Image: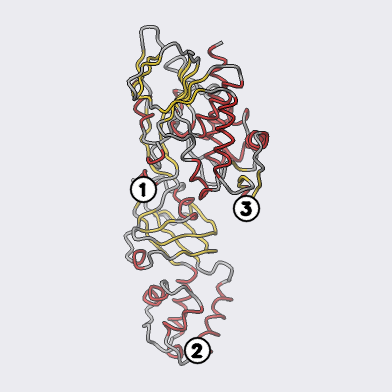
């Protein structure tokens, strides 16, 4: 059976494009290099799948620092509310958590993947384990497609490129979509990591490797001292620097490492005002007057953090609490409320959750997701030069652009 629409990539954007086009009556061939569809979806949200954000379209656009306005049309036609309705109609109960993050009620990403897979099967979308290896414009101005299994696909009328970015290459996101788009004339904005752990030259990070801090506040300052990000949550010290949810979110706001430098400032006691924390320090020092500071600090900080705190405050570990000066106590207070870690740059793009960069959006029609250069070529998802903050926004971009590409491809072939 000849297929009218060929889609490369069975991630969230590709599956949404396939379902939308098939619902519109088109016959669809979906190519996926992995043996299972939606492999990256399985690991999103720590395996729970934060599939969208329960918010208005304007908030999604405001949370998309890179080319957010390009998404206005696609997002208006398939909003977060539409995403929730789509999965509810497929039989997946949903719930809303802190930050308006939407998850399947079961907390299982597999339920989202299964719902998409069975809808593809119901709509008789042809799934083929294969990878597009070459695109070429022919004399008619359309595309010739070659695949890894040495097949040349003919007889189709529209092609959707939804191959993802460069992040998590083990899931199939190897960046090959960029080369395919480039081969037919598209400009590729240099891919870079976003939502990624951060490297630090500070040796304290390696010393505290494995230490997870919960309910701390993180501020990120640039070299001019301007706060570019501030939030409360959880972070992790690693052998290379910093990771954890707070740090991944912060990284999306640190986009100028080539021209700027950044410092992470951690408030270890965000629930306590300085005066309140100082009063507690006085009580601890008085009650444990004859104790060594290394032991006394156990009431105030995790074990791995204590030696670093004392060193930064200039207090010997074996010093008795009753010998701590007012100046030393003040310094310790300042460090507890502002533990600074210099950042040298992001980890490699392969470790990022999302890739920033991709197909230049000025070369794509924002209403249809069709190439302005090659008729019948559509784009969806992370292959485009759009990316957002954490909170379900990036998956919402995938659903919305996938829906727009699938709908427009179906209209195009008519």
Residue drawn at (39%, 7%) of the image: 140
The label shown at residue 245 is none
Q: Which residue is mark 1?
A: 257
Name the foreground residue: 64 vs 144.
144
Q: CA distance from mark 2 to mark 3?
A: 39 Å
Q: Which residue is mark 2?
A: 288
In what element is the residue under mark 3?
A: helix
Find residue 265 and report its horizontal and vertical position in percent: 45, 62
Depth check, mark 3 against mark 1: the one in front is 3
Find residue 378 and report its horizontal and vertical position in percent: 47, 22
Check disc 1: other Cα within 10 Å, few if <14, some if 14-19, many if 20+: few
In what element is the residue under mark 1?
A: loop
The label shown at residue 98 is 3
Find residue 62 and report its horizontal and vertical position in percent: 57, 40
Dot 3 or dot 1, earlier in sequence: 3
Residue 182 in view of the camera: no
Name the foreground residue: 216 vs 399.
399
Find residue 91 and report its horizontal and vertical position in percent: 66, 37
Check disc 3: other Cα within 10 Å, few if <14, some if 14-19, many if 20+: few
**Which residue in the rendered view is the most extreme toward the bottom?**
290
Depth check, mark 2 against mark 1: the one in front is 2
């Amino acid at each position: 059976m000849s297929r009218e629409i060929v889609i490369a990539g069975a991630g969230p954007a590709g599956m949404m494009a396939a379902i939308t086009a098939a619902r519109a009556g088109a016959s669809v061939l979906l190519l996926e290099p992995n043996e299972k569809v939606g492999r990256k979806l399985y690991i999103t949200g720590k395996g729970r799948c934060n599939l969208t954000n329960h918010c208005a379209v304007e908030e999604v656009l405001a949370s998309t620092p890179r080319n957010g306005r390009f998404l206005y049309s696609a997002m208006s036609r398939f909003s977060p509310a539409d995403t929730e309705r789509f999965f509810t109609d497929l039989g997946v109960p949903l719930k809303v958590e802190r930050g308006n993050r939407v998850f399947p009620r079961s907390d299982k990403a597999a339920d989202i993947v299964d719902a998409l897979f069975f809808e593809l099967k119901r709509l008789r979308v042809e799934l083929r384990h294969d990878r597009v290896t070459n695109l070429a414009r022919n004399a008619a101005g359309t595309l010739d497609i070659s695949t890894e299994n040495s097949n040349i696909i003919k007889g189709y009328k529209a092609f959707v490129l939804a191959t993802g970015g460069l992040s998590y290459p083990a899931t199939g996101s190897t960046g090959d979509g960029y080369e395919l788009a480039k081969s037919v004339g598209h400009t590729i904005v240099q891919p870079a990591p976003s939502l990624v752990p951060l490297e630090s030259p500070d040796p304290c990070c390696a010393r505290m490797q494995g230490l997870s801090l919960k309910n701390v506040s993180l501020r990120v300052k640039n070299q001019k001292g301007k706060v570019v990000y501030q939030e409360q949550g959880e972070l992790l010290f690693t052998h290379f620097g910093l990771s954890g949810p707070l740090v991944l979110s912060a990284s999306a706001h640190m986009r100028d490492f080539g021209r700027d430098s950044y410092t992470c400032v951690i408030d270890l006691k965000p629930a306590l005002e300085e005066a309140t924390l100082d009063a507690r320090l006085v009580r601890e020092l008085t009650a444990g007057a004859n104790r060594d500071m290394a032991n006394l600090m156990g009431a105030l900080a995790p074990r791995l953090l204590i030696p670093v705190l004392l060193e930064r405050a200039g207090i010997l570990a074996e010093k008795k609490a009753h010998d701590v000066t007012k100046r030393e106590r003040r310094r310790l207070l300042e460090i507890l409320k502002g533990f600074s870690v210099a950042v040298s740059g992001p980890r490699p793009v392969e470790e990022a959750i999302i890739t920033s960069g991709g197909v230049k959006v000025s070369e794509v029609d924002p209403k249809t997701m069709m190439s302005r250069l090659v008729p019948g070529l559509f784009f969806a998802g992370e292959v485009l030069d759009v990316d957002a903050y954490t909170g379900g926004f990036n998956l919402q971009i995938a659903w919305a652009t996938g829906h727009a590409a699938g709908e427009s491809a179906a209209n195009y072939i008519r």
